[in-house]
Structure formats: structure tokens, C-alpha cells
Amino acid sequence: MELKTVILQDFTRVAAFVGLYLVLFLLAKWMKDFFTPYKINHELTKKDNLAVAVSMCGYYFGTVAIFVGALFGPSQGFVKDLVIVGSYSIVGLIFLNLSRIINDKIILRKFSNVKQLTEEHNVAVGAVQFGTYVATGLIAAGAVTGTGGGLETAVAFFVLGQISLLIFSFIYDFFTPYSIHDELKKKNIAAGVALGGTLIALGIIVLNGVSGDFISWQENLTNLAIVNLMAFIFLPIIRFVMDKLVIPGGDLSNEIIEDKNIGAGLLEANVAISFAIVLNMLLYNVI
């Protein structure tokens, strides 16, 4: 095959998938408008609502994660690849939008998220939603990757990944020396950033448990259980240890609670995500 022909085919393939992503991006925006009980454009342009903007950034990151996850897998031909990637991406977008409703009712269950975002312009809540969307996008991306399964396995492992996310939110709230909901209601951005970052960290780890080829229910569920166990044990331990070590002579939790130090919240989020990346690679070589 001539070099020109190869280059033309590669360019055509890349251009087609870029076009597909743009279509899916517009679809993601439409779906978000449809499922959200407020006008996003109005909040962003007329009210300059930073809280909604932060939440939307997480949503779009989640959208990208889903699309990239759908790209993985052996090629089955140009046209069929477009259909498969588009179909799984749409399924992932449905997951992403449904998860907001579920997570709003459970993770941030003690107040109205819509009111906090639209009336209070609560950036702390926006930061948690940012983390939830990114984590959900990663879980959805993992659920639609690999071979050997189908729509039923994708749905099953996405649901199990969401359950992992919800369980961990209770564990985080239990081990954190302050009330997450109280701090968020006080518009403590540091607390919101810390929780949002930790949810992303969990999403990175759970991604390992829900992705890859489907071999059997027993083997894949066992892998997910191992990944969850590692995350549930090590993430709280890392937070406790780093609470005393990240700021020498200080206390990360006190900085978040008393000083509402956004830098401290960013540090906690960074430590959690960094550790999740390391643990994810270690588990990838073991599982």
C-alpha cells in the first residue's frame, strides 16, 4: 500500500472520530440541559454562576473519559468502529446523567443540590459534583472497554462501580473529623475540593476493577472486590497519614475546617489522586 494511501486513510479515520466526538459533545450538552432542572446557559452567562461552571467542567471531563474508554478495543473495521464507539459513548452519557440524580440523593443527600448551585452559588457543592462527574466518567469508561462482554456487562459493572462510589462516600464521611454536609452548606470550598478530589481518586482505582476483557462473572467480580477492598482500606489510611505530614507542624483538617484553606483542600485532593494513580498501576500489574 502506498504511503499516500496510508496517510489518507489515517487522516480520514482521525477526522471521522473527531467529528463523532463533536457530535457526542453536543449530545452531552443537550442531555445535560434535558436532565437538569435549570437553564445552564442562563446560569453561566446571565448569572455568571461559578458553581455551575465548575460542575459543568467535571461533566465534560467525564464525557471525554467515556469517549476515550469507548475507543479502546480491537478494530472491527472503520464503519463498525464508528458505530460501536458512538453507541457505547451514548450509553456512557446516559450513565453519567443518571448518576447525577442518584448521587445528589445519596452523597449530598442532606440539602438540595439545585438550590445550592443556582440560588446560593455554592462553589463547594460544585466542586463535589465536579469530582463525582469525573469519577463516574472514569467508571463508565471502564465499564464499556474490553472484549467478551456486551451491554449487560457494561450496565452491571457501571452499577457496581457506582455502588462502590456511594459506599466510599459514607466511609469518607465517617473517617473525616468534620461533617462534610455542614462544611459544604457553609460554602467551604476547601472541603468540597478535598472530597471531589478523593472521589476522583476512587474513580481512578475502581476503573481498574470494571475495565478490561470480560472473562467470567466470577473472575471479574472477584477483581472488582479486590480493587474496592484496596481502595476502601488504603485511601482513608493515606488521608490520615498525610493529614499530619503534608503540612509540617500543621494539621490539614484544621486548615480545611477552621481556615477554609483552599490550598489545603487542593493538597488533600492531589495526594489522594497521586496515590490512586500509583495504586492503580500496582493493581494493573497484579490483577
Image (cartoon, rainbow, N blue to C red):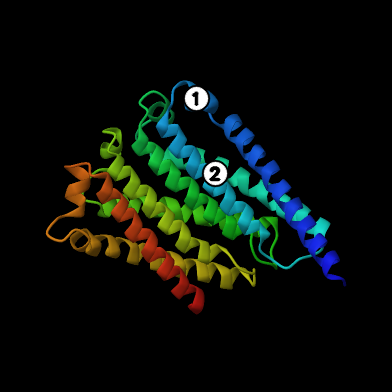
Q: Residue extending furthest right?
A: 1
Instruction: Name the residue tied to disc 2.
Output: 60
Examine the rendering and report whether any part of residue 287 can be seen.
no
Number of on-image labels:
2
Residue 251: % across, % down: 16, 55
Instruction: Name the residue tied to disc 1.
Output: 45
Q: Residue extending furthest left?
A: 249
Mark pair 2, 1: CA separation: 18 Å
Amino acid tagged 1:
Thr
Examine the rendering and report whether any part of residue 135 can be seen.
yes
181 left or right, relative to 205: left
Q: Mark 2 packing: few (<14 Cα in 10 Å), some, or many (20+)?
A: some
Which image quarter: residue 244? bottom left
Q: Is residue 199 above or below residue 185?
A: below
Which quadrant is the N terminus positioned in?
bottom right
Q: Is residue 120 above or below residue 230?
A: above
113 left or right, relative to 175: right
Point out which mark residue 224 bears: none
